Amino acid sequence: MDKNKKKNKPKIPNIGNQIIIAIFIFISITIVYSLVAKTPETVKHLTISDVAKGVIDGTTQKIDVVGQDVTVTFKDNTKGIAMKEAESSLSDTLYRYGVTPAELASTPIEVKDQSGFGYWLLNILPFLLPVLLIIFFIWMLTRQVKGQGMQAFTFGQSKARITNPDDKNNRVTFKDVAGAKEAKEELKEIVDFLKNPKKFLDIGARIPKGVILTGAPGTGKTLLARAVAGEASVPFFHLSGSEFVEMFVGVGASRVRDLFKMAKKAAPSIIFIDEIDAVGRVRGSGVGGGNDEREQTLNQILVEMDGFEPNEKVIVMAATNRSDVLDPALLRPGRFDRRVLLDLPDRSDREEILTIHSDKKPFAEDVNLKIIAERTPGFSGADLYSLMNEGAILAAREDRKKIAQFDLIRSIEKVMMGPERKSHLLSIKEKKITAYHEAGHALVASVLPYADPVHKVSIVSRGSAGGYTLKLPLEERRLQSKKEFLDDIAMAMGGYAAEKMIFGDITTGPSNDLQVATSMARAMVTRWGMSDEIGPIALESDGGRTMFGRGVSDQEYSERVSALIDGEVSNIMNNALAVANQVLTDKRKALDDIAMKLVEVETLEQDEYNQIIIANGIMPKKKDLSAE
């Protein structure tokens, strides 16, 4: 169960604990009262005749009369209490017992009033205190039960967190977001409208009501939304799409109404819904019933964004990395008018992101962020943040005060493949098999013209990989050709071919290589139209096979076409294996040299690797041949 759900789960009052607490309080008060009310002196009970005898004998110091109680203080500092008749005074009573007026006048007698707050409190408190304690106990139980009842009524309230414009600690601006130039330009118009709407309204323009940010995970969608709020200096309501839906029917729709009500009161304002695909998936898929809670929540969002009561001063922003599953009604003009796409950063953008994340980090003189940016193609902004953080951790672990270039290089591999597993020791045979496996990958990549150049080869275990070959393109590219795919598949088959050629057997080492290569070959056939047999037909979407058109579906082609696809994928894999075998056979000496060097040193950097292949007549790639 989620920790947040545990935290927010209503607490049921523990009646047993409440009773124990009440009993403890009652005992404590009783003890305190008994200590306060206890008479510290020993008082003996007297009769009226004893009182009269003391007055006659002259042993009485004074007499205090409070109602019917007569307190006698003797000259030896002892005290006694007697009871007189209610109808007569003490003087008359003593006179009847033989006390003369002279003897009575020689003894001080003080009559005290039997009224006053203290008197009544002292007499009533023993009876009143238990009653008050019981009332307090019942009130505590009623209060807690009422709190649970009230909490049940607050389920429909919005759980949105609010960032106020004057919150300087959490403020983010466009200066804190590197790259994403086109996205920032689109969002600057939103900021401009919130600051100066008259400029747009005077010319008859209407600002978009909604902006949806789409892109791969870690590309900065949430960060950009925070930057818009920081630049516009308006209240920013942010929450996740999953926070709308609860187990109770109608709660999601109620929270949507409450959210927009709050935003309209604070207008102009921004509502940001992260991971909106949690509630915005296409309706009518049959998942969860035809009228499930998620669909009710989505319907309420649609109405609030563009219903009978539109609001121009509330802008809704949303983020998702699955825009293909969103309901078309959500994406139509009038709701989410603009779709801002966030791509993975290119080399210059990566350098800017690294510069931002290097703030407050002490660097050594050899650090070159440009080189780090060149060696991190495909990294998102979140990956780059993790890279810089890992570099700082590596330097701190070795008790150094500055981060070196070597730390950043190592952190690239750690982010890509996981930490080194130095305790994962290989036997001599396993080490040799791994060395030939990785040498096969590297050699095929170096010989084939459309494969990327090799930057590093290692047989040190990282993550789940027993070894790895790091190859990086010489320049950024957005498109990839069929020749490049075929060479990449052949490179992936290089380890398989090397193991079979050298040892005459196959291990489990190439399992991941086969999965990646097969997936690539299938995508060539079914998605990119790179099959001569099937032709330019897209048989599957980018997410693979889908259902009900958008989720998980039945196969959209016949059994005959499925057999053709399997045959084409098999042909591509077999041809790639043949190419890899041919390269390794022709360059057998280079394969042995690379493998033996790996057994010796375990890791070959680019310069060391290039020296070996140059000695075997293979020239390293100096330019990217994919443009040819």
Image: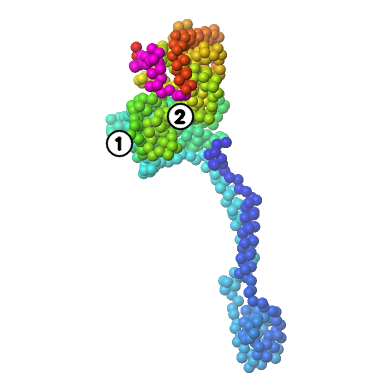
Span of residues in magenta? 601-625
Left or right: where does residue 565 sit relative to residue 46? left
Amino acid type, mark 1: Asn
Kindly report the distance in space between the C-alpha atoms of the residues bearing marks 1 and 2.
47 Å
Q: Is residue 518 above or below residue 15?
A: above
Crowd tier of the residue under label 1, counting other residues whose Cα lies within 10 Å: few below 14, some 14–19, many 20 or above = few
Image disc number at residue 414: 2
Quadrant showing the C terminus = top left
Residue drawn at point x = 39 percent, y = 26 percent: 376
Mark 1 vs mark 2: give the one in front.
Answer: 2
- Disc on the earlier residue, 1 or 2: 1
In this view of the protein, can residue 504 be seen by the observer?
A: yes
Quadrant showing the N terminus = top right
Magenta span contains residue 385:
no
Residue 488 percent across, percent down from the top left:
44, 15
Residue 229 percent across, percent down from the top left:
37, 37
Q: In this view, does 391 lie above or below 16?
A: above
Place residue 386 in its image quadrant.
top left
Image disc number at residue 30: none
Task: Please state which of residues 339 and 469 is positioned toward the viewer in this rendering.
Answer: 469
Q: Which residue is tagged 1?
A: 196
Colouring method of the image: rainbow
Task: Please state which of residues 212 and 468 is positioned toward the viewer in this rendering.
Answer: 468
Magenta span contains residue 617:
yes
Crowd tier of the residue under label 2, counting other residues whose Cα lies within 10 Å: few below 14, some 14–19, many 20 or above = some
At mark 2, the secondary structure is helix
Residue drawn at point x = 50 percent, y = 26 percent: 461
At mark 1, the secondary structure is loop
Residue 61 percent across, percent down from the top left:
62, 86
